Amino acid sequence: MGIPVQGIDAEILDDEGAPVTDGRPGTLALRVGWPSMFAAYLNHPEAYDSRFSGGFYLTGDKAHRDRDGYYWFVGRLDDVINTAGHLVSPFEVESSLLGLPEVAESAVVGAPDPLLFEKVVAFVRLKPSAEPSPELDLRIRTWVANKVSTIATPQDVVFVPAIPKNASGKIMRRVLRARYLGEDPGDLSTLEEGL
């Protein structure tokens, strides 16, 4: 994400609102009073007020700061997967999957699991030269285990023809999660690509 611009005082906070040491992930927060700070969420004052704590605006992003002062995006806090008590960033798993030569795109979601609480599910769009196979499924799982961690290893790999995105190119994880669970995906008016 880079270094904050002049006038922005950013911090990484733990669950109790205390700053964490460099290199540790936490909530990206901005000290209240930055230039051009917005004054409200239109027609949602309670939601706006809920984003502030201890003089900070809580962005909803999980990030970490390196020793050089650069901030690194880990994932949205509402997208983080809690699998067996460990927090897994879908973004981190997706990024690792792009290192496989067969993978064109990927999207990762959490799905309910009776044993793990949530399991990691990877949706993968392959390059035209690749074909889905049990061998590739195993290779994908092994790749994530080695590149990210064994905790982040997908419990299920779903090969798809497209990854659903909105007009700005953001992956629509709720659509994938609903599809995986056989549920109604809700409003699809912003769907630009996929499904």
Image (cartoon, grey):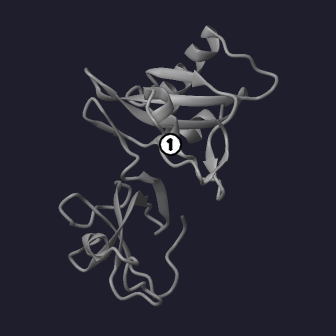
Name the kind of residue labelled 1 in the image: Arg
Q: Residues within 10 Å of mark 1 (few under 14, many from 20)?
A: many
81 w.r.t. 182: above or below = below
Q: Residue at x 45, y 27 (%)?
A: 182
Query: In screen coordinates, is 172 left or right of 56?
Result: right
Residue 117 position, x and y percent, is: 27, 29
For the N terminus, give its image quadrant: bottom right
Question: Residue 181's x, y, as percent?
Answer: 43, 27
As drawn, 57 above or below 131: below
Query: Count of labels shown?
Result: 1
Write the residue at 42% across / 84% down. 38
Which residue is at a point 41% across and 58% down the rendered structure image? 63
- Residue located farthest toward the right when viewing the structure as drawn: 129
Mark 1 residue element: helix
Q: Position of residue 16 (x, y in %)?
A: 17, 61
Q: Pick whichever, 121 or 181, lies toward us.
A: 181
Decide if residue 174 is on the left or right side of residue 112: right
Q: Is residue 55 above or below residue 60?
A: below
* Residue 44 point in image, percent of width and height: 33, 73
In this figure, which residue is indicated by the disc labeled 1? Answer: 173
Out of 171 and 69, give the one closest to the viewer: 171
Q: Residue furthest top?
A: 134
Measured along the vertical axis of the image, is residue 9 above or below residue 106? Answer: below
Task: Report the quarter where the C terminus lies.
Answer: top right
Is 9 or 60 nearer to us in this picture? 60
